[in-house]
């Protein structure tokens, strides 16, 4: 976890061998850890200049560009990465997220489905797929995917996505279960408690919803939601 030390080593490696694509990739990863996104982009592009077919560099640069909103190039890179690394669930999920950002929802759904074929127990991928189905107004299918994800999820981010999605899909009781697990996964935040309150309200649990909102305001009296 010494990103600065790693960066120095990879810079020396590239000085010794400027054509070392792996060192350029790892330098980009170190830069991302240091929150130097401009440096990371330069390093990833350097890796691809050395080896245009380097799938890991295509993936990392594609994800970085997606986060920056450069969706056209991100999709192009992530398509190449997913093709080169067809057995990687992460490659297909990253492509699905970028396609969804571009409103190419049918293609995004195909990539989520492919990722789930490869990693059927990945709760976050299944949750994202369920949320995509909601965008397509397929509430029944979305509720099925999100309910399955709830049985797999352990991390708070996935539970939050699942709870939000189940509430919007009409499964208020499932949403309450997901949000209760998310709140129990660590110190509660006002945002989590507010989402729990929304789920409780949808389930007709008004007293519990008020109690959750009171807890949120105890954590942060200025929280607005």
Image (cartoon, grey):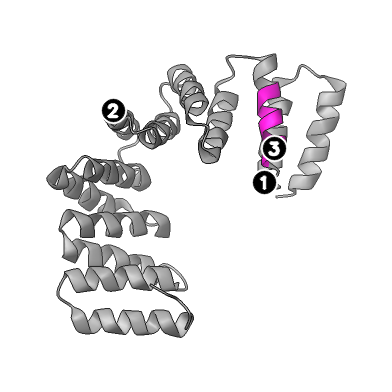
Labels 1 and 3: the sequence-earlier one: 1
194 left or right, relative to 142 = right
Disc 3 element: helix
Q: Which residue is mark 1?
A: 33
Q: Which residues are magenta?
A: 37-46
The image quarter containing residue 121 is top left
Q: Which residue is mark 2?
A: 110
- Give the image location of residue 162, x and y in percent: 29, 55
- Where 134 falls versus 212 (above or below)? above
The residue carrying pointer 3 sits among few (fewer than 14), some (14 to 19) or many (20 or more) residues within 10 Å by Cα, namely: few
Labels 1 and 2: the sequence-earlier one: 1
The residue carrying pointer 1 sits among few (fewer than 14), some (14 to 19) or many (20 or more) residues within 10 Å by Cα, namely: some
Separation of residues labelled 1 and 3 (CA atoms): 12 Å
The image quarter containing residue 134 is top left
Labels 2 and 3: the sequence-earlier one: 3
Q: Which residue is mark 3?
A: 38
């Amino acid at each position: 976890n010494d990103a600065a030390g790693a960066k120095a080593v990879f810079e020396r490696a590239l000085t010794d061998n400027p054509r070392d694509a792996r060192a350029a990739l790892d330098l980009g990863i170190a830069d991302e850890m240091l929150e130097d996104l401009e440096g990371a982009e330069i390093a990833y592009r350097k890796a691809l200049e050395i080896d245009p077919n380097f799938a890991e560099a295509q993936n990392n640069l594609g994800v970085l560009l997606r986060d920056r909103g450069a969706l056209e190039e991100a999709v192009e890179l992530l398509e190449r990465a997913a093709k080169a690394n067809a057995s990687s669930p992460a490659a297909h999920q990253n492509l699905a997220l970028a396609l969804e950002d571009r409103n190419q929802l049918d293609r995004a759904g195909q990539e989520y489905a492919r990722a789930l074929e490869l990693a059927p127990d990945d709760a976050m991928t299944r949750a994202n797929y369920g949320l995509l189905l909601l965008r397509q107004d397929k509430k029944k299918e979305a509720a099925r995917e999100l309910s399955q994800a709830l049985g797999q999820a352990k991390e708070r981010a996935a539970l939050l996505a699942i709870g939000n999605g189940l509430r919007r899909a009409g499964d208020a009781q499932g949403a309450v279960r997901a949000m209760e697990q998310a709140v129990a996964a660590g110190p509660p935040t006002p945002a989590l408690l507010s989402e729990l309150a929304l789920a409780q309200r949808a389930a007709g649990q008004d007293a519990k919803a008020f109690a959750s909102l009171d807890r949120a305001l105890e954590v942060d009296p200025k929280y607005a939601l």
